[in-house]
Amino acid sequence: MSNTSYERLGHRIQRAVTSPAAVSRRQITLERQPDESQEDWDQILDEIDTNEHVAVTRIDDDTASLRWNPAESGA
């Protein structure tokens, strides 16, 4: 069973967020890849932005910065 493009995007973001560098800095800058749909990109960023412990800053249509504070989220 293959994953949808949205699920693949979610997995990619999850891997990026849990990378040692991102965990240490508590932030990451993400770029939409050419094979990822704009609709999926916008949807997932909107969903991440609903988390009160994550700040999503859209730099442009294809780039976003995520910042978080694990102390506030209970992590």
Image (cartoon, rainbow, N blue to C red):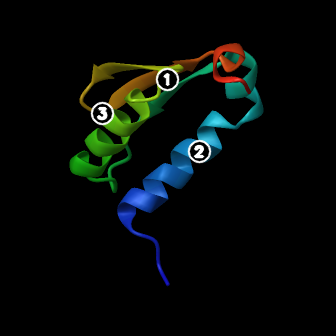
Query: Residue at coordinates 54% horizontally, 20% vertically from top-left?
Result: 53
Please say if 1 is above or below 65.
Answer: below
Residue 36 lies, in percent from the top left, at 33, 53
Q: Residues within 10 Å of mark 3 (few under 14, many from 20)?
A: some
* SS for callout 3: loop
Q: Amino acid at mark 3?
A: Asp
Name the foreground residue: 55 vs 33.
55
Up-down relation of residue 52 to residue 12 (above or below): above
- Of marks 2 and 1, which one's residue comes earlier in the chain? 2
Q: Residue at x 29, y 44 (%)?
A: 43
**Circle 3 or circle 2, nearest the eye:** 2
Left or right for 65, reference 24: left
Query: CA gap, disc 2 to disc 1?
Result: 12 Å
Measure how far apart labels 3 and 2 are at the Cα level. Answer: 17 Å
Amino acid, disc 1: Leu
Mark 1 highlights which residue?
66
Of the numbered discs 3 and 2, the one sitting upstream in the chain is 2
- The residue wearing badge 3 is 62
Whether residue 74 sits left or right of residue 29 in the image: it is right
Position in image of residue 13 (x %, y %): 53, 43
Question: Marks 3 and 1: in contact by CB < 8 Å?
Answer: no
Residue at 36% across, 28% down: 63
Q: Amino acid at mark 2?
A: Gln
Label count reads 3
Residue at the image point whose x is 32% and y is 34% from the top: 46
Q: Position of residue 12 (x, y in %)?
A: 54, 49
Q: SS for tag 1?
A: strand
Farthest bottom residue? Answer: 1
Q: Which residue in the structure is indicated by mark 2? A: 14
Element under disc 2: helix
